[in-house]
Image: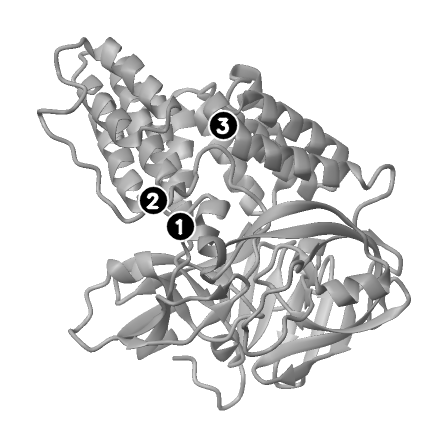
Amino acid sequence: MHISRFAGPMVLLIAGVLGAGIAVSAQSPVGRTLTAEAQLTLGDQMFAARRYEEAFNAYDAARDSERPGTRIKAGTGQVQTLLRMSLFWEAAHMGAVVASRDPAHAAALAVHGDSLWAAGMFDEAERRYDEALARDAREALALHGKGRALAARRQLVPAADLILRAISIDDREAAFHYTLAGVHEELRDFRGAARALDRYRDTVPSKEMEDLTAWAQAQADFLRSFGSRQPYELLTADTVYTVPLIIDDDRVKVRGRLNGREDVDFVLDTGADRTTLTPGIASRAGVVPVRTLQTAGVGSVGVGYRGLQVARIDEIQIGDLRMAQIGALIKSPSMPGLPRPEGAGFSPLSMGLSIEVDYGTGTLTMGRVLPARDFPISLPLRMQRLPFVRGTLNGSMPVNLAIDTGGTAISLSRRAASRLETPTARLVPAKVFGTSGWDPSAFLLPYVDLEIAPGVGSSQRSVVVLNLDAPSALLGFELGGILGHEFLSRFVVRIDLARGLVGLWPRPGAPTR
C-alpha cells in the first residue's frame, strides 16, 4: 500500500503520543481562574505551539462558557487537538459532545461531522453536514465537509462548487484549499490544483510551515511539470479494454510497456494512489524524477513514512490501451532486507479507469465507463485516494476497508483491533512486510467476524493486525483495514468509478465467508 500525499493541516502524526489518552482534570496546568474567552485564546496559543495536552485542557476550561460561540470554538479546538495526535475515535466522541451541547447550532453539527469523517464514518459525517447546512447554508465547515463527501463519491464538479463557496466565506482555512487542490487534480486541472496548493501553503499555521509548506511546494512543482500537457490523456479509443492477468504467488500482474521501450510486469495495485516504478525500470524507460514526496504504508522505516521520487511517465501501454502523461512514484531509494525485490505497480484507478477483475478467467477489464451490469452484491464506493467500502466487525463495530488488489490477506489496523472484544487467546506474531519495510508489531488476531454485506465476509477467522497509523495520518482518517487478494479472489470484482459502486460476483464453488 502506497499513499503519496499529506492529509493537510487537520491531521498530523505526532510520534510518541499515538495511543496516549489526554488527561483532563479540574487542576489543569493552565488553571481555571481565567475567563472562558481567555482560556480559548490560551488554547489557541498552546495549539499553535504544538503543546497539545495543554491546549486540550485550556479548551476544556473554555467549554464552561455560557456563550454558545465560545463553547463551540472550544469544542472545535479539542476535536482538532485530538486529530493532530491521530486519536480519531476519541475525536469522534468529543465531536458528539460538542453537537449534543449545542444541537441548534450549525457549527456544532459541522464539527461533529468532521470528527466522524476522521473516524472513517463517512455516511454519518455526510448526514451531519446536511443537517448543518439545513440550519445555515453558509456554514463554511459544513460546505467543505459536504464537498469532500461528494468528491469521495466521484461527484467532482459539484464538490468543487461547494468547496469554493466555503473558501468565499473563510479563505484563511488551509484545509479548504488543500481539499480543493485534490478535487482539481482529480478533474485533471493540474494548474488549478497547483494554485490551490500555493494558497494552502500561504494559510498553513506558521508553526507547521516547515513540514507542510515543503510538501505543498514539492507537489505544486510536480503538477506544474506537466506544463501544457494533458494529464492522463487517452491515446486510443475511449472504450473498454480487456487484458490477460498473470497470477503469480498470490500477486495479480498485468504486462505493459513504458515509453515504448521497456516491457514491465506490473502488480495490479488498487492499494496505491499512483503507478509505481523501481529505479531500474524508471532509468531504462527514461522516466526522470521531478521531486521527492512523502508516502506512507505498512512497515517500520520512518514509522511507516517513506520519501519517494515523483515523476511523469510519457506513455504507458497495457494491452491495446495507451495513455500519456501519467503521474508515478519511483521507489528510490530501494528498500533493503525484503524477502523479494520490490516491483512495479499499475494503478488504473488513479488514471480514472474503472476496472473489473475476473480471477476465474484471468482477465482485467478497464475503461472510463464500463458497461452496466447487475451484481448480486453491490456496495457503495468511497474513493479517498484509495477505494473504500464499509464493513462490520463482530456484528456491531463499523470499519472502513481499503480494497487492495496488491495486498494479500484480510488485515485490520491495530486501532480497530484494540476496540474489539475477542476471546482471550495467545496472539501469534506475524511476519509482514509492506512498502515501508517490515512491521515488527504485526500479529494474528483470532475469532474475528467481518461482514461487508449479508453473508459476505469472513467468520471466526484469524486476521492480520498491522500498524496503519502512517497511512491513516496521510489519508486524514482512520484506515480500519484492508481487503486483499485472499478475499477478493473469491469473486469477480468491479470497482466502478463512474457509478460509485463496488460489485462482487461470487465465483462458482468459492466461499463468500
Which residue occupies 47% across, 56% down?
A: 304
Distance CA(mark 2)–CA(mark 3): 21 Å
Q: Looking at the image, is mark 2 or mark 1 earlier in the sequence? A: 2
Question: Which quarter of the rendering shows the N terminus?
Answer: bottom right
In the image, 55: left or right of 200? left
Describe the colour scheme in one phrase: one colour
Relative depth, front residue between 352 and 182: 182
In the image, 100: left or right of 405? left
Which residue occupies 41% across, 46% down?
A: 123
Residue position marked by numbered label 2 in the rendering: 88
Question: Which quarter of the rendering shows the C terminus?
Answer: bottom left
Report if residue 352 is visible in the image. no
Residue 131 figure quarter: top left
- Please say if 464 is above or below 217: below
Relative depth, front residue between 452 and 31: 31
Which residue occupies 67% across, 39% down?
A: 219
Residue type at the position of mark 2: Phe
2 and 1 marks in contact (CB < 8 Å) = yes
Q: Circle 1 — which element?
A: loop
Residue type at the position of mark 1: Glu
Which residue occupies 47% across, 62% down?
A: 298
10 Å crowding of disc 1: few (<14), some (14-19), many (20+): many
Q: Looking at the image, is mark 1 or mark 3 earlier in the sequence? A: 3
Q: Residue furthest bottom?
A: 509
- Please say if 196 is above or below 121: above
Distance CA(mark 2)–CA(mark 1): 6 Å
Residue position marked by numbered label 3 in the rendering: 143
What mark, if any, has residue 161 been given in the picture? none
In the image, 44: left or right of 482? left
Q: Looking at the image, is mark 2 or mark 3 earlier in the sequence? A: 2
Measured as percent of width and height from the top left, residue 55 is found at 28, 25
Report if residue 233 is visible in the image. yes
